[in-house]
Image (tube, rainbow, N blue to C red):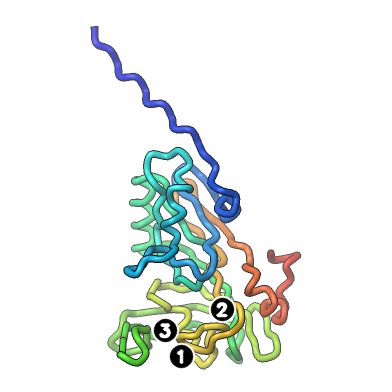
Amino acid sequence: MMRGRLPRPAAPRQAPPAPIAARIILLRDDAMVLDKPAGLPVHRGPRGGASMEDWLEQLRMGRRHLPQPAHRLDTDTAGCLVLGRTKPALGALGRIFAAGQADKTYWAVLRGGPAEDDGAIDAPLRKTSSAARGWRMEVHPEGQPAVTRWRVLGRGTGLTWVEFRPETGRTHQLRVHAAAQGWPILGDPLYGEAAPGGLHLLARAIALPLDPPLAATAPVPPHMQAALRACGWDAATAP
């Protein structure tokens, strides 16, 4: 008589610590979306230091595999970060991001701003470096194609609140494109000028064609609220 293998008991779900749990915007079996804080890198750098990788074990919540980021956000960018919770989900997410099928929406506050209310920036980008300034990205005809669509959401004295919708995902794309137009993102020390609170760039929302579709929206971080209010943002209608 053959005996069937007993089913492996499900691991108990363990809630992450409250500060990390408060950062979970969306949670489902295959994926989760976190509200990444500004200033925390997604991956640990060669010099070590804190990163989102420190959170992964606490975000396991009884699963066999650690959740893994499916894409990158700049260290100083806050907002929606998608993590896959299973190997099949990570594969599907990787294909979606590689194919440019992720619908990403960013909010930014600019120093100055465009005269028009909407438009597109089509400017190729490449990486450059020097001993004096280190590495950075620059607009260059030999760079990789990069396209950013933008729309003004509000204006204030010397500031503009815009929605960015990148069609490509180049490193520092929004920061370099905005600066190249003469309206750098507020608080950008690399392509503009530092400001209290740091970089005013938020990965506001993301939508992915998973089955079922995934959609999430990140709240406005505290360091961006004063500048957004100066441009007409109302937390009661757009938290």
Q: Residue at x 48, y 67 (%)?
A: 40
- Quadrant housing residue 231: bottom right
Confirm or deny contact between disc 2 and disc 3 (CB under 8 A).
no
Mark 3 burial class by Cα count in 10 Å: few <14, some 14-19, many 20+: some
Q: Does dot 1 land on a helix, a strand or a loop?
A: helix
* Distance from the alpha carbon under mark 2 to that under mark 1: 19 Å
Q: Which residue position holds label 2?
A: 198
Mark 2 burial class by Cα count in 10 Å: few <14, some 14-19, many 20+: some
Earlier-in-chain disc, 2 versus 3? 3
- Percent across and percent down for residue 16 are 53, 46
Q: Which residue position holds label 3?
A: 122
- Percent across and percent down for residue 105 are 53, 68
Q: Which residue position holds label 1?
A: 180
Q: In the rendered structure, which amino acid carries the disc numbered 2?
A: Gly
Mark 1 burial class by Cα count in 10 Å: few <14, some 14-19, many 20+: some
- Using the rendered image of the protein, determine whether residue 209 is visible from the camera's viewpoint: no
- Percent across and percent down for residue 33 are 51, 55
Viewer-proximal residue among 72 and 98: 72
Q: In the rendered structure, which amino acid carries the disc numbered 1?
A: Ala
Instruction: Please identify the residue farthest to the top as the structure is shown.
Output: 1
Q: Does dot 3 land on a helix, a strand or a loop?
A: strand
Residue 183 drawn above or below residue 106: below
